[in-house]
Image (tube, helix red, strand yellow):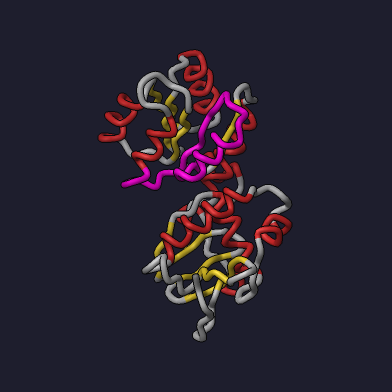
């Protein structure tokens, strides 16, 4: 789907940031690019707005008075898989990893160019299953009731979409390109261009298992290979797990 196609859909975005100038700047910029935009100065007001309005994406600042953005994201992820882009003035990788662990789709560090924010928002929205055209069956990797499309990076269970964060999509795609092959952490890091750190790989593995396994202690599909790492198992025969 092209960016122009996205604009015609008039997605509704909620900006949550205690900085009024940033809210006004982003609201005006995104509205000029054909998005509907609402804003809130804290998470308490945001949650009230979300009780009555449905949004397509959240833009959430991390450092806010009261409940911070990470705690807000952790709370809403219990019941809501809405795509979320986090804003942070912190450069510590641990802070970004915490956000990814809680289910953030992307990060931007302040200060940033509004044009880059727009592109990141468009990229997140293009990955939503309902906004994608039907994909070629040859691009699908199937395991059990699941199907993962390597072009759209979308996961389906019995043809129903399963929400994945950006990091989860990239990691699962790595396994789906070579199913039934064991990958070490170094293999995964090399396959992803060195863009995923050790802790974030472990976090993404755990999160994917929560979404595809009936019992995470005894995974059927994303299995642990002792002494090596993991593999995506698509055959009926089983290997030993931890």
Q: Residue furthest bottom?
A: 237
Establish if 59 lies above or below 236.
above
Query: How many circles with numbers are drawn on the protein?
Result: 0
Residue 64, horizontal then vertical, whole percent: 43, 21
Judge from the rendering whether residue 210 lies leftward or rightward of residue 32; answer left or right: left
Establish if 9 lies above or below 26.
below
Identify the residue at horizontal 53%, vertical 78% (top origin).
Answer: 234
User: For residue 107, what is the image quadrant?
Assistant: top right
User: For residue 116, what is the image quadrant?
Assistant: top right
Question: Closer to the camera, 228 or 208?
Answer: 228
Judge from the rendering whether residue 218 lies leftward or rightward of residue 26; answer left or right: left
User: For residue 50, what is the image quadrant?
Assistant: top left
Identify the residue at horizontal 64%, vertical 74% (top origin).
Answer: 181
Residue 66, horizontal then vertical, whole percent: 35, 21
Residue range in magenta is: 77-104
Establish if 219 lies above or below 53.
below
Establish if 83 lies above or below 209.
above
Identify the residue at horizontal 43%, vertical 18% (top origin).
Answer: 18
Identify the residue at horizontal 52%, vertical 51% (top origin).
Answer: 203
Residue 1, horizontal then vertical, whole percent: 58, 51
Residue 68, horizontal then vertical, whole percent: 41, 27
User: Is 89 a magenta residue?
Assistant: yes
Judge from the rendering whether residue 138 lies leftward or rightward of residue 44; answer left or right: right
């Amino acid at each position: 789907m092209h960016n122009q196609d996205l604009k015609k859909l008039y997605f509704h975005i909620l900006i949550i940031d205690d900085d009024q100038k940033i809210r006004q700047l982003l609201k005006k910029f995104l509205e000029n690019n054909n998005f509907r935009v609402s804003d809130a100065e804290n998470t308490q007001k945001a949650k009230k707005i979300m009780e009555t309005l449905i949004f397509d994406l959240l833009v959430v600042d991390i450092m806010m008075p009261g409940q911070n953005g990470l705690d807000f994201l952790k709370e809403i992820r219990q019941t809501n898989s809405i795509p979320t882009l986090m804003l942070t003035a912190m450069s510590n990788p641990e802070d970004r990893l915490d956000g990814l662990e809680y289910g953030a789709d992307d990060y931007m560090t302040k200060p940033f160019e509004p044009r880059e924010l727009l592109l990141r928002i468009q990229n997140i929205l293009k990955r939503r299953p309902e906004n994608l055209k039907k994909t070629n069956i040859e691009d699908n990797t199937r395991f059990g009731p699941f199907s993962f499309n390597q072009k759209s990076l979308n996961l389906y269970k019995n043809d129903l979409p399963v929400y994945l964060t950006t990091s989860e999509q990239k990691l699962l795609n790595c396994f789906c390109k070579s199913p039934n092959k064991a990958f070490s952490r170094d293999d995964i890091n090399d396959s992803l261009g060195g863009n995923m750190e050790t802790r974030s790989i472990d976090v993404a593995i755990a999160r994917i298992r929560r979404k595809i396994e009936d019992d995470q202690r005894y995974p059927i599909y994303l299995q642990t290979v002792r002494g090596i790492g993991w593999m995506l198992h698509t055959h009926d025969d089983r290997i030993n797990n931890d």
